Image (cartoon, rainbow, N blue to C red):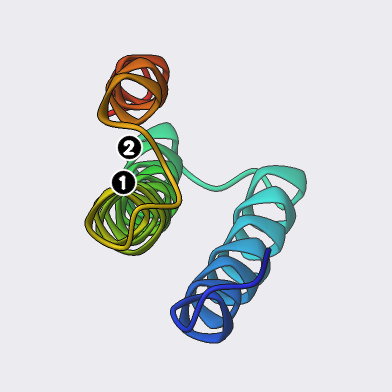
């Protein structure tokens, strides 16, 4: 299922992917480890942010709206929320 937030999340992930490619190039060029660690931290933060946005959007639109509109039982929404919680 495609959510309204997916295009923005895809943009974030593509930027992170490009950034990661840059880090790989930096490693191949023998750049300083401190610089590499800093750049890897930025890539990690970008991916973590994209993941968080995806999960929050799913909770709001699939779980919350599903329960409110009657298409999803509260117990099923809670079960799925518990599954998602381990990725936060």
Q: To which residue does mark 1 refer?
A: 38
Question: Crowdedness of circle 2 by 10 Å Cα count: few (<14), some, many (20+)?
Answer: few
| Left or right position of 53 against 4 | left
Q: Camera-side residue: 32 or 11?
A: 11
| Left or right position of 10 against 57 | right
Residue 14: percent from the left, percent from the top? Answer: 64, 74
Name the quarter where the N terminus is drawn: bottom right
Label of residue 34 in the image? 2
Name the quarter where the C terminus is drawn: top left
Q: CA distance from mark 2 to mark 1?
A: 6 Å
Q: Camera-side residue: 75 or 19?
A: 75
| Left or right position of 67 against 30 | left
Determine the residue positioned at 41% across, 55% down.
Answer: 62
Residue 47: percent from the left, percent from the top? Answer: 45, 51
Decide: is 55 above or below 83. Answer: below
Residue 76: percent from the left, percent from the top? Answer: 40, 24
Residue 13: percent from the left, percent from the top? Answer: 57, 66
Q: Camera-side residue: 74 or 4?
A: 74
Determine the residue positioned at 36% across, 33% down.
Answer: 73
Question: Crowdedness of circle 1 by 10 Å Cα count: few (<14), some, many (20+)?
Answer: few
Asked whether disc 2 touches disc 1, contact meaning CB atoms under 8 Å apart, the reply is yes
């Amino acid at each position: 299922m495609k959510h309204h937030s997916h295009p923005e999340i895809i943009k974030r992930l593509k930027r992170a992917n490009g950034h990661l490619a840059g880090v790989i190039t930096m490693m191949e060029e023998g750049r300083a480890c401190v610089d590499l660690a800093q750049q890897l931290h930025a890539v990690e933060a970008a991916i973590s942010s994209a993941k968080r946005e995806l999960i929050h959007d799913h909770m709001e639109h699939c779980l919350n709206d599903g329960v409110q509109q009657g298409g999803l039982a509260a117990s099923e929404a809670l079960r799925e929320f518990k599954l998602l919680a381990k990725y936060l």
